[in-house]
Amino acid sequence: MQTWEQIINTALLGTDKRTLAISEWPPELAAVAAQLQASVTDREDLFLQTAALAFNYRQCGAKPLQKEGLSITKAQLEEKQYCSPLALQTLKDIFDSESISLLQFWLQLCEAKGRIVTPEFVPELLNLGIPQKKLQNLVAACCGKRGEWLARFNPEWNFSTATTDTELWQTGSIEQRKGVLEELRKTDATTAREWVLQTWAQEDAATKVEFLLILANNVNEGDIAFLESLSKEKSKKVRDLALWLLKQIPGSPIVQQYQQVLQKTVTIGKKGLQIKLPAGLDESIFKTGIDKLSNSKEFTDEEFIVMQLMQSVPPLFWENRLNSTPDLIIRTMQKDATNKKFLPALVQAVVAFKDQRWATAFMQNSQVFYIDIIPLLPVKEQEFYSIKFIDQFAENIIEHAIKREDTWSIDLTRAIFIHTARSVYQYNRSFYSRYIHCIPVGIVTELEKCAPPEEYLATTWRNTGEYITRLLELKKQTIQSFND
């Protein structure tokens, strides 16, 4: 409607510089506009009344643009069942809650059950998928054939048009490609690496870094040849990251080289472990990120080199080299002041090589609590030590807990809430909304017990508790709606 554009121009320029002439009005409104101009003398008042007239006329509807030769096919018939009325009502409530974590939880259950939303939900879900890139694959799956069809009419919805992982990898956005690669790496590390190899030459440096970080989740000996080939990459970030990954593969040449040096460096004497670098040390190790000079007063240059090497060899090496067990090695090293200094390096190796046996041995024998070991422990042990040490390492323990994909126990949740309830600015409502998928529904009856003794904090916690309760009710309702 051209008249509406002229009204907008008048509003921008001002009524003293521009007015609407009768000739500019549509024939259907010209008579009414003439009456207004005859009866209203104030320019601003006349403008507002004519704008209101045009607005109401415009709201009555307009004929769509016609284009010859354009044909639109119907959406294909759906192959999956629609969600239950309870599930759809829950989805509406989740929209109102604005909790992306709950929305993801709902979509995951919907996809797992092989269900789809009814057509009226498709546009809103597609719109939500535009900024929430990690949800795009789930949104596409839950919108079914109707979503795939509708996406053709809006380029921003085109994430829903690819239906298989292979298609997403070949034609999807960078976030979609990262998503399918991450999932594939968990179940088929070899194929995931082959996918990366197929497109590697076409990727930019930033994308290469992203893909290497995903391969790090399940790095293995099959990756060695590919990672070694990256030593010629132009990007220093890519080269450094490839080297870092090689240092996490026990069978890689660089780790084997470090082990050969340590084999000659560590001996067993009357005073326990004796550590001394051999004469004629292979200088090539200093080209792999090992520094020659100590950056700490605690270590001599020689000790500093040994410490760096220890960080980069699997803990199993020490069992074979010393013909001993993890428990005994840890206890022995703690008895000697020099050996004790190297325990943190050994802990870093445990974390780098994800050695669960050594992680448990450290928890049971170490005089020091090493927080980074917690994710390597079985879930029950993770929670036991998290609860035990949360007063000393609250932020670190919460950071590890929110990275878990499973639901916390009631006891761990209570311990976390007792801490977060006292830090209302750091752990506000958005924190609980973001990680509601980790919070068990059963904690509802425990919320009052988590309140701080200070009244001003307790009042804030009660308000927060009401919010958490609403989110948990939606979570419970989501679970119920997909348990048919």
Image (tube, grey):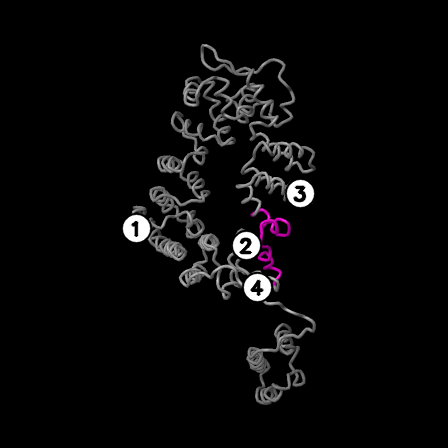
Going from the N terminus, do you reach mark 1 or mark 2 first? 2
The quadrant where residue 395 appears: top left
Q: Is residue 391 left or right of residue 196?
A: left
Helix, strand or loop status at disc 3: helix
Quick check: 140 above or below 286? below
Given residues 344 and 162, the one toward you in this image is 162
Q: Does 160 appear in magenta?
A: yes
The label nearer to you, 2 versus 3, is 3
Please tell me how crowded label 2 is: few (under 14), some (14-19), or many (20+) other residues with Cα within 10 Å.
many
In the picture, the disc for residue 198 is 3
Location of mark 1 (residue) = 445
Instruction: Work out which residue is located at the far top of the displayed protein and give it.
Output: 270
Helix, strand or loop status at disc 2: helix
Residues rendered magenta in the picture = 154-179
Location of mark 4 (residue) = 76
Query: Where in the figure is residue 29, as x and y percent of width and height?
Result: 60, 85
- The residue under the point 66% across, 84% down is 21
In the picture, the disc for residue 374 is none
Whole-Å distance between the Cαs marked 2 and 4? 21 Å
Query: Where in the figure is residue 163, as x and y percent of width and height?
Result: 58, 54
Amino acid type shown at disc 1: Thr
Given residues 237 and 268, the one toward you in this image is 268
Q: Is residue 56 left or right of residue 230?
A: left
The label nearer to you, 2 versus 4, is 4
Going from the N terminus, do you reach mark 4 or mark 3 first? 4
Amino acid type shown at disc 2: Gln
Going from the N terminus, do you reach mark 4 or mark 1 first? 4
In the picture, the disc for residue 136 is 2
Amino acid type shown at disc 3: Gln
Q: Does 404 appear in magenta?
A: no
